[in-house]
Amino acid sequence: MIEQHLLLKRVDFIFVQDTDWEKILQKSIHRTKQELINELISSELKGRGGAGFPTGLKWKLTSEAAGDEKYVICNADEGEPGTFKDREILTRVPYKVLTAMAVCGFIVGAKNGIIYLRGEYKFLEKPLKDAINEFSYFCNKINLDFTIKIFMGSGAYICGEETALFESLEGKRGEPRNKPPYPSISGYRKKPTVINNVETLAHTYTIFKYGAKKFYDLGVQYSRGSKLFSISGDTPKPGIYELELGMSLQDFVDEFGDGDTKAVQVGGASGFLVPRKKFHETAIGYQGKLVGISLPTGGSMMIFNSSRSMYNLLDNYLEFFREESCGQCTPCRIGCQQLLAGIKAVKKGERPAPYLDKLLKLSETMQYTAKCGLGQSVANSFASIVENFREEMIY
Amino acid sequence: MSDTIHITINGIPVDVTEDTVILDAAKKINVVIPTLCYHQDICVAGNCRVCLVEVSGQKRLAAACATPCEEGMDILTNSLKVRNCRKHIIELLLSEHNADCTKCYKNGKCELQNLASEYKIMTQDFIELYKEKKRTIDNISPSIVKDDSKCIRCQRCVRTCEELQGVNALSVAYKGHEMKISTFYEKSMNDVVCTNCGQCVNRCPTGALVEKNYIEEVWDAISNPDLHVVVQTAPAVRIGLGEELGYPVGTRVTGKMVAALKRLGFDAVLDTDFTADLTIVEEGSELLGRLKKVLVDKQTDIALPMATSCSPGWIKYIEHMYPEYLPNLSTCKSPQQMFGALLKTYYAKARNIDPKKIVSVSVMPCTAKKFEAARPEMYGSGYRDVDYVLTTRELAIMIKQAGINFVQLEEMEFDRLMGESTGAGVIFGVTGGVMEAALRTVYEIVTGREIPFKNLAVLPIRGMEGVKMGSVKIENTLEDWKFLEGVELKYAVAHGLTNAKKAMDMIKAGTADFHFLEVMACPGGCLGGGGQPIPTNLEIRKKRAAAIYAEDLGKPIRKSHENPEVIKIYNDFLGKPLGELSHKLLHTSYQIRERT
């Protein structure tokens, strides 16, 4: 059984005004830490950056980790191609994010928060600083010891990977670390760290404000709540939409497509390309036992109509990965180069079509062996494009 | 307290302590997991992905070098999935690697080649990426050649340069497909802070970083009947060379080495240990002189602590990093350079050979010696002190090329005049050795008695601790040295430049109370030098150290100032320590260098 909602439900939580943040903050820090964690756990909120780790559990683990020095980090290095929602959150409702960070700090025992802001979002630095100043003023007033700083990224995609982000914050080259240890035990400066996507933090604000139930009631099993989608491509209405999780891709395309939708890339360059014939059987949400094909996404939904070449699309993604791999691990650094060179060679007829199968195997190896999510997820777009549009790769 | 963790590897149960990584757990049951980026001396990187293993229940493979064992783990090191993935990884590395193995200096000694051979990678299905990349070979440095087309980006060199040496001459540049190991502004290794220590060369798994070899130049010289080619061998060579020629680690091959050098055709085979002894006399006198100036003459401009100057990697390091402390360096040339200068003066005169026709070759455990020999300061005799420097590895290559059955050779003795040495000269090859040799001599000069340690083994100086500090109390001095009565002569010994930095930072902070500092650029001292046999690790270095101390103990004379050839050279030629001729031939000056 696939539990699906037949209609797309638009939701409006994230962008409702944040003018009540002082009240929410005060209310929250007067509850017990356990209460707050339980609230989060029962909401079943999962990380909105794309990986989908349960947020309540993440905070719980960090709160239980030993150490006086802990950190709360807001990952605002929004770099996945086709994603542009975090920018909007930080522009329109920054206090929600700041409040969520402070509550998180209160729960886990961290006195410092850092917003790792994407280098290209330089324009956000000033308004965000102003907001932080006001926020700090209030924290002082209520004797809440929590400081937030902004750290500007330098434009590397890989620094959105949490451990590479820590390295970058520490002034080093942005290369992912070995895991374990995980950030909840050893993160920034090797200290217990909560690192959350901007949107995840904004959702916790909703949960602290309305309670877990209101959030939990949205969505489907294993994929609760709502989510922001950055919709782009061949659509008459591109933009950012907050939608309930669990929708079928068919419903999505019916709503946002231009009537000639050939495929949708769910989850950006590191996500999956879903062809028209699979729209019906695909739902948008986190993977779970009862769900059929369920695709997670950090919010990027790129719609392509029949005028688009899937070869060009893949070529573009691979060019991106070849460039944005940090270069440290073999499967990712060389694998991306081989995949790109490989499809070019097949296209030019320099390699026979079955070479694509060798490349598919390679992409599978990358998935099993790459050090971090970047290299592991190249196979997602590669396999879904090559398997579904093989003829476009060859002719 | 760490708990015991129970796991199985390939179905075999293993008990390990907490925090044991899978790689080490596998070693316990004699399961070998191949590695490339892993090296025992440096931090774990987990980036080559060759050591991947399958953990049941996990879709992704785990890097054995970086993944700690967890209770109940069921690990497969040779499953089909592991094999297929590992082969893929090796094939990928080969596709980016300029695999012209037959033309590579590391042919037969390359870890990537070995892996390819083990996994029988017979075809190259992937596109040969290295062909599209611009090949850059940096061979400007007299010590090290860097060929990026052979680099597999394991970053062992980067971690070595950063962690062991604190130099950071090599670092990672660019990202993605352009990622490479580079230097500041991609300058030549010759033009950056590189100390030429060669520790990166010792740890490079492929031919991307190798010593610049002078094998053909030396063969040419040997073959030229007009030239008189003399070779000197450093203390650590005799305990390392055997490793390249079929002996276990820690075997002393002094006599066979001498015999092999004679068979190679050198006109004389002499010993750097002789000038090591000479260095002790010169440097010991220099130290006593500085102490006297401070204690008796009350001079305030005397640089103390005095630091040793035998290690050319250390010299270049301090020239770059602590130029304000150059006056603290002993002005003594290194034993190699003293030897070279004397070869073309003292030896030439005694043997009645035109110094122009003498070719001075040294065999060193070191790559920085190549740079040192090329320094403009090293022409005290009017000629270049040392013409060619070979590493221990290069000598082994020459011995093999000459078809010498090394193991079967009859042992021979060094030639005379500059071939006699003492146990004190031998221990120059191990960290703390110069200090120990100096103390044996200085203590005896000042008190007229042997240093009070059983078998002259100044044990507190020995061992592999990064920075060792201690003191020797001087009592009942001879009449000339009354000013040292009751003085506690304090010393510090550091090996590896990261440890040198610790000692220097103490001096800088004013917290150093020692009088004499020994620094060797390489971990373990010269026995762990950049020109020594590969591989290296702590265990190997300890075995080599034991061999050096055994060589010392076996010597009839154990104190530098008692070396009869040293006594003779002062009588016949130099006059006295720190004399005019010494100053001209045996002492040098230093340069301030940029910190880039």
Image (spheres, rainbow, N blue to C red):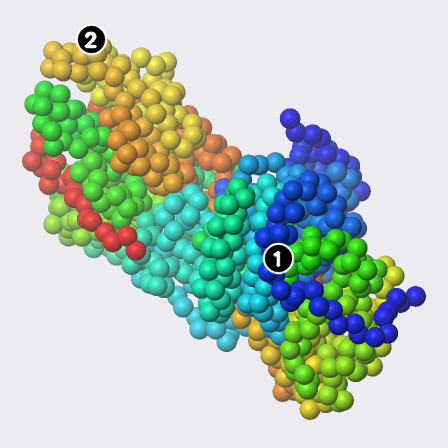
Q: Is residue B207 above or below residue B353?
A: below
Q: Is residue B403 above or below residue B444?
A: below
Where, by quadrant of the figure, is residue A196 drawn? bottom right
Q: Amino acid at mark 2?
A: Asn
Left/right of residue A253 with respect to residue B500 in the rendered view? right
Where, by quadrant of the figure, is residue A229 drawn? bottom right
- Position of residue B337 measured from the top left corner of the image (x, y, whole percent): 22, 43
Left/right of residue B223 with respect to residue B297 in the rendered view? right
Report helix, strand or loop for mark 1: loop
- Position of residue A316 measured from the top left corner of the image (x, y, whole percent): 60, 79
Report helix, strand or loop for mark 2: loop
| Distance (Cα) linking label 2 and label 1 | 85 Å
List the residue tagged with mark 1: A20
Residue B476's mark? 2
Give neighbour class at mark 1: few <14, some 14-19, many 20+ (Cα, 10 Å). few
Q: Is residue A382 visible?
A: no
